[in-house]
Amino acid sequence: MPVNDELADEQRWVEIGRIISQVQTITHRHHTFLERLGDASIKPLTGSIIAMIVLFFTFQLIRLVGEGLIDYVFEPIFDAYTPLVIKLSELLGPGFVHDILIGTLIEEKIDYVQSMGLLTTGLFVPFAMVLPYVFAFYLVLGFLEDCGYLPRLAVLMDSLMHKIGLHGLSIVSFLLGLGCNVPGALSTRLLDTKKQVFIAATLMAIAVPCMAQIAMIVGLVGKYGTKGLGIVFFTLFIVWVVLGYLLNKILKGTSPEIFMEIPPYRIPYWGALLKKLWMRIRFFVGEAVPYVLLGVLATNIIYILGIIEFMGQIFSPIVVGLLGLPAEAVAALMVGFLRKDVAMGMLLPLGLTLSQAIVASVVLAMYFPCIATFVVLTKELGIVDMTKSAAIMITSTLLVGGLLNIIL
């Protein structure tokens, strides 16, 4: 290059530097609070503390909102609805139709938990006992999604998830499964390998009760205090970890590393949040209520026909001998295939002891998914893998239920 050209080029860069110095000011930039919080959320020590705090307040808020809706919205609605049901009960009189629509009168009164009629328990369970907690869960989940915390939780959980053959992003499937197992099962298709899909789907069906079932577990075991609830959920967590570890060692395949964008923390847009909440609630009602009504109807019919008593005699050695439950619990296990929350509600009138309530809650949570989840999982896994998954469910249920019965 000629000397003159080199000088011209140097002068050009000097002029560029002069212009930049006039229009640009360089100062030290301090991280904002949200940026520092975002960095702390993915570090093992601080991130674990933040995760425990977030999850604690999440479930406290779900409980607060759910119980508030039950006390101040749904119970007054059903109180106003009760005279209509009583009038219909008087018009129908005793008989088959009364048993199907109204159910059994408890001390000549309507008991929405125990009557087991289509127009009593069939409506009360999904709307007054389950929907409030599902609403609260999806409200909080939507907030955590839109504010940017869930990707950080996925990164934080990645190391633990790899020990059970998954990566951190699969935590989203389990969180969705806590609301309802059906969207949780559908979300497993986002995972990378067949091995990951099988492990995530099986673990969710066995050890992740939906919010509807959690509400019923609280109703069944919660009256004995937090000790019983702690044993139930700690057992399910241990099953989740141990079974996941074993499946990861036994099944062939790989678990790719997590690769995802971590957005900055931000204030959610409430319009989009409420629209997403409405879509999820509408899906839950459309999916849940028909199966609850079907479960109550099927229970009444097989009870009237004496099938439950017959099945109780057949499975008595397992239910009574191995699990330590009353023979009447067979009906709940049968209905659990249709709807687990209804099955859990059927245990309430049996007057179970604390140990029986714990065993029953764990067994119902583990032994099989509800029919809606079963159909979705069959579609996602295929018949062969779903058969393998079902065999794992039944085997682990009998093993864990029997051990719990012996220990307790």
Image (cartoon, rainbow, N blue to C red):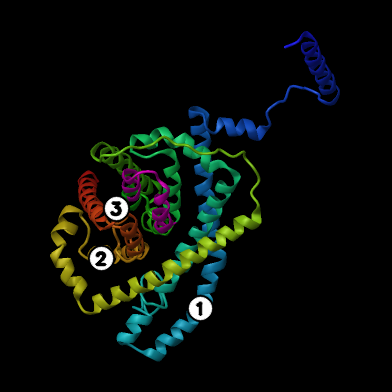
Quarter holding residue 23:
top right
Whether residue 390 is visible to the viewer of this picture, yes or no, is yes
199 part of magenta stretch: yes
Identity, as a three-letter code, of the amino acid under mark 2: Met
Identity, as a three-letter code, of the amino acid under mark 3: Met
Mark 1–mark 2 distance (CA, rounded to whole Å): 30 Å
Whether residue 53 is visible to the viewer of this picture, yes or no, is no
What is the secondary structure assignment of the residue under circle 1? Answer: helix
Callout in the foreground (3, 1):
3
Mark 3–mark 2 distance (CA, rounded to whole Å): 14 Å
Is the residue under label 2 in contact with that under label 1 (CB below 8 Å)? no
- Residue for badge 1: 81
Is the residue under label 2 in contact with that under label 3 (CB below 8 Å)? no
Residue 367, given in percent of the width and then of the height, sits at 26, 55
- Residue for badge 3: 366
Query: Which residue is nearer to you in this view: 361 or 368?
Result: 368
Q: Residue at x 50, y 43 (%)?
A: 56
Task: State which region is magenta.
Answer: 180-201
Q: Residue at x 16, y 71 (%)?
A: 310
What is the secondary structure assignment of the residue under circle 2? Answer: helix
Quarter holding residue 108:
bottom left
Residue 320, given in percent of the width and then of the height, sits at 17, 58
- Going by the image, does 38 lie left or right of 184? right
Label annotation for residue 334: 2
Query: Which residue is nearer to you in this view: 365 or 60?
Result: 365
